[in-house]
Amino acid sequence: MSKVEQIESQIKELSSEELAALRQWFSEFDSRVWDRQFEADVKAGKLDKFADRALRDHTAGKSTKL
């Protein structure tokens, strides 16, 4: 049995309260992981082309005020 299958099996046995706590923990954990990846992508320049395009579009009048 893989680790994921073991975790799935254990999750199925959680009470409603335990499942709610797991959801909260995982949401926070996943957000931190996503933030770290986003920051790494920014530092690596992976998002530069998107920022450049957005600035060009804005300068060309292709944006709208929020």
Image: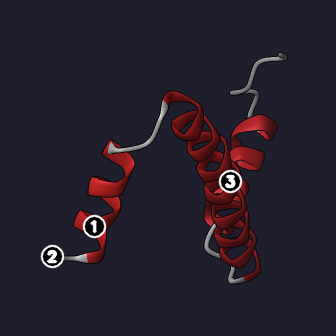
Q: Which residue is mark 3?
A: 31
Q: Which residue is mark 2?
A: 1
Q: Nearer the viewer, residue 17 or 66?
A: 17
Q: Nearer the viewer, residue 20 or 52?
A: 20
Q: Quadrant of the C terminus?
A: top right
Which residue is rendered at x = 64% and y = 71% of the image?
A: 37
Circle 3 Cα neighbour tier, 10 Å, few/some/many (<14 / 14–19 / ≥20)? few
- Asked if disc 1 and disc 2 are in contact, CB closer than 8 Å, the reply is yes
How far apart are the two marked residues, 2 and 3, measured between alpha carbons? Answer: 28 Å
Image spot of residue 53 (x, y percent):
65, 51
Q: Is residue 53 above or below residue 64?
A: below
In front: mark 2 or mark 3? 2
For marks 3 and 1, the one nearer the N-term is: 1
- Asked if disc 2 and disc 3 are in contact, CB closer than 8 Å, the reply is no
Disc ID at residue 26: none
Q: Which residue is mark 1?
A: 6
**Amino acid, disc 3:** Ser
**Amino acid, disc 1:** Gln
